[in-house]
Amino acid sequence: MTHHAYIIEAGRSASVQKSALEAIFGDTAIETSEFSFDTLGIDEARVISELSAQKGWEGKRAIFVFANFITREAQNSLLKTLEEPLGGSIFFLIVPAKAELLPTVLSRLATLRVVPEELEHALDPLKFLSATKPARLKMIAKFVEALADEERSRMESVRLIEALEREVHIRAKDDTSLLTLAAELETVRSYLHDRAPSQKMLLEHTALLLPVLK
């Protein structure tokens, strides 16, 4: 089922746009419009809403909106557009963290998970857990290198730790001693939300902390 509007947690990346189009439209050619803002305010929101009312050349248009921050006024302004876009438009709102959006906005958006091509083979949680510690450190170096943007790097690092937490909790059902490691991972995740600690150091600490888990 195709929704009117989607939310994607990611940084600005051509591969995110490509992956989103493939996920929703497959090989079908779609007219696209793209906006990128550090801060999306009320005036920008009105321009986006006006554009969405224009019909695409084949009845549909994919509108990609990248924004690091969206003001409360802009979010409220976009509510009707997101709920009932005119002109056959389909919205893709791409932000670093959807938790920053108003609940009323989130209720009108379907979550779409895409992995940027540059991260696709960078680090797999299961391979990470089963790898030796020296191999893990090499994987982390590659992972960090693929993420030049600081905000995006921190977000992807948090996702990695969350994935490792889930895997450790699954294994803890048969080995309760792993619960201590799960608590350690939770601490690492909390540090990643702070801008001060080095992400690479925290990930390297994780690599050395966890035992090899097959």
Image (cartoon, rainbow, N blue to C red):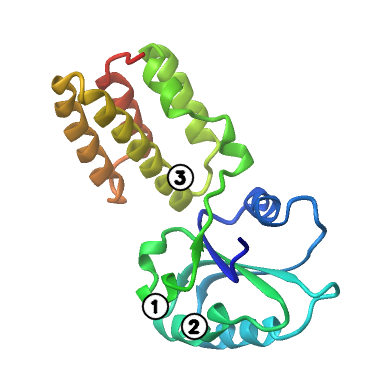
Q: Nearer the viewer, mark 1 or mark 3?
A: 1
SS under mark 3: helix
SS under mark 1: helix
The CA distance from mark 2 to mark 1 is 8 Å
SS under mark 2: helix
Amino acid at dot 3: Ser
Which residue corresponds to the image point at 41% horizontal and 59% vertical from the top-left? Answer: 97
Which residue corresponds to the image point at 69% horizontal and 75% vertical from the top-left? Answer: 89
Contact, CB < 8 Å: mark 3 with mark 2?
Answer: no
Instruction: Please give the count of numbered marks on the rendered protein.
Output: 3
Contact, CB < 8 Å: mark 2 with mark 1?
Answer: yes
Is 68 placed left or right of 134 in the picture? right
Which residue corresponds to the image point at 42% horizontal and 24% vertical from the top-left? Answer: 126
Q: Mark 1 or mark 3: which comes first in sequence?
A: 1
In the displayed structure, would residue 105 be above or below residue 140? below
Q: Position of residue 121 (x, y in %)?
A: 57, 29
Contact, CB < 8 Å: mark 1 with mark 3?
Answer: no
The CA distance from mark 3 to mark 2 is 29 Å
Amino acid at dot 2: Leu
Q: For mark 1, what is the residue? A: 104
Amino acid at dot 1: Thr
Q: Nearer the viewer, mark 3 or mark 2?
A: 2
Q: Position of residue 140 (x, y in %)?
A: 44, 27
Is 88 placed left or right of 129 in the picture? right
Which residue corresponds to the image point at 39% horizontal and 37% vertical from the top-left? Answer: 160
Q: Position of residue 209 (x, y in %)?
A: 25, 22
Is 180 placed left or right of 110 in the picture? left
Q: For mark 2, what is the residue? A: 79
Which residue is nearer to you in this view: 199 or 163?
Answer: 163
Q: For mark 3, what is the residue? A: 153
Of all residues shown, which one is farthest toward the right? 57
